[in-house]
Image (cartoon, rainbow, N blue to C red):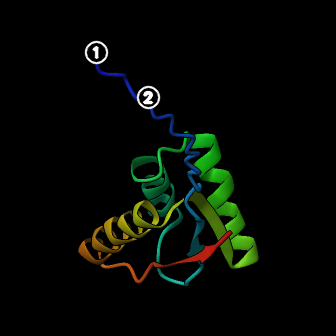
């Protein structure tokens, strides 16, 4: 009779959370407040009250945080907004920075 050999493997898998990035809207003198609110609702899934608050932050402070996302999602949202703003003829500027 053959003996059974049992191997035990004690491996711990460490999963690192992805780095998060803030998507920042920048104020300009041409993009309408209505367009900024519309973008915040459609692209960033904000409710109208949140969108208006962020829009006022942009208007008063010069910048406002649209959301915090992993890198790929943040970059995709920025591209979507840039395409929408270019289509509408607005020079809306966005950036992202590591949180």
Number of residues whose C-alpha sits closer than 10 Å to that of mark 2, classed few (under 14), some (14–19) or many (20 or more)? few
What residue is drawn where x is 46% and y is 34%?
Answer: 7
Labels 2, 1: front one: 1
What residue is drawn where x is 41% and y is 70%?
Answer: 75
Quadrant where the image shows the C terminus = bottom right
- Relative side of 53 to 85, left or right: right
Residue 30 on image: x %, y %: 48, 81
Q: CA distance from mark 2 to mark 1?
A: 16 Å
Residue 26's place in the image compared with 69, above or below, is: below
Residue 13's place in the image compared with 39, above or below, is: above
Residue 48's place in the image compared with 63, above or below, is: above
Q: Secondary structure at mark 1?
A: loop
Q: Secondary structure at mark 2?
A: loop
Instruction: Give the mark nearest the N terminus, 2 or 1.
Output: 1
Residue 55 on image: x %, y %: 62, 61
What residue is drawn where x is 66% and y is 68%?
Answer: 64
- Relative side of 18 to 80, left or right: right
Residue highlighted by disc 1 = 1
Image quarter of residue 23: bottom right
Quadrant where the image shows the N terminus = top left
Q: In terms of depth relative to the viewer, which is nearer, 82 or 18?
A: 18
Residue 64's place in the image compared with 1, above or below, is: below
Residue highlighted by disc 2 = 6
């Amino acid at each position: 009779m053959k003996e059974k050999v049992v191997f035990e493997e004690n491996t711990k898998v460490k999963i690192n959370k992805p780095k998060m990035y803030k998507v920042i809207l920048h104020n300009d003198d041409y993009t309408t407040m209505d367009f900024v609110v519309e973008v915040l609702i459609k692209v960033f899934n904000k409710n109208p009250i949140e969108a208006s608050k962020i829009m006022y932050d942009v208007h008063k402070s010069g910048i406002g945080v649209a959301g915090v996302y992993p890198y790929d999602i943040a970059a995709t949202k920025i591209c979507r907004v840039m395409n929408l703003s270019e289509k509408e003829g607005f020079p809306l500027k966005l950036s992202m920075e590591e949180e």
